[in-house]
Amino acid sequence: MGIFIVLSFFSPVVIYQAFKNEEHPFFWIVLIIGIILCITAIIYGFWAIKVLINGLLGQKKTKSS
């Protein structure tokens, strides 16, 4: 969950820096890295919610045939 929090704050900063320096030759590289970091933060966010829900409510019980 710590990775999610770090990426949630760090990835918008990377995207902001990319748009701030649009004329720089590394614009596209930095923008793509920022977008990948945002997607990773979203994935870790859903994973963290799943872990919290399973911890509070327990694992989902399935029927065994």
Image (spheres, rainbow, N blue to C red):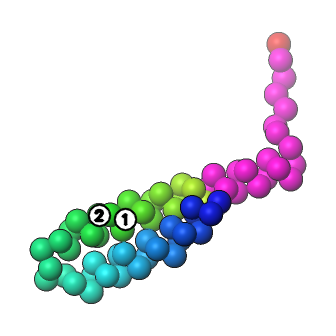
Residue located at (31% from left, 82% from top): 17
The CA distance from mark 2 to mark 1 is 5 Å
Asked if the stretch drawn in magenta spans residue 15, the answer is no
Q: Secondary structure at mark 1?
A: helix
Local crowd size for mark 2, using a 10 Å CA cut-off: few (<14), some (14–19), many (≥20): some
Residue located at (28% from left, 78% from top): 18
Q: What amino acid does circle 2 point to?
A: Ile
Image-quadrant location for residue 61: top right
Q: Mark 2 and 1 residues: CB-CB less than 8 Å, in contact? A: yes
Residue located at (73% from left, 50% from top): 51
Magenta-highlighted residues: 46-64
> Where is the C terminus found, in terms of image quarters?
top right
Q: Which residue is mark 1?
A: 35
Residue located at (28% from left, 70% from top): 31
Q: Position of residue 3 (x, y in %)?
A: 57, 61
Q: Which residue is mark 2?
A: 32
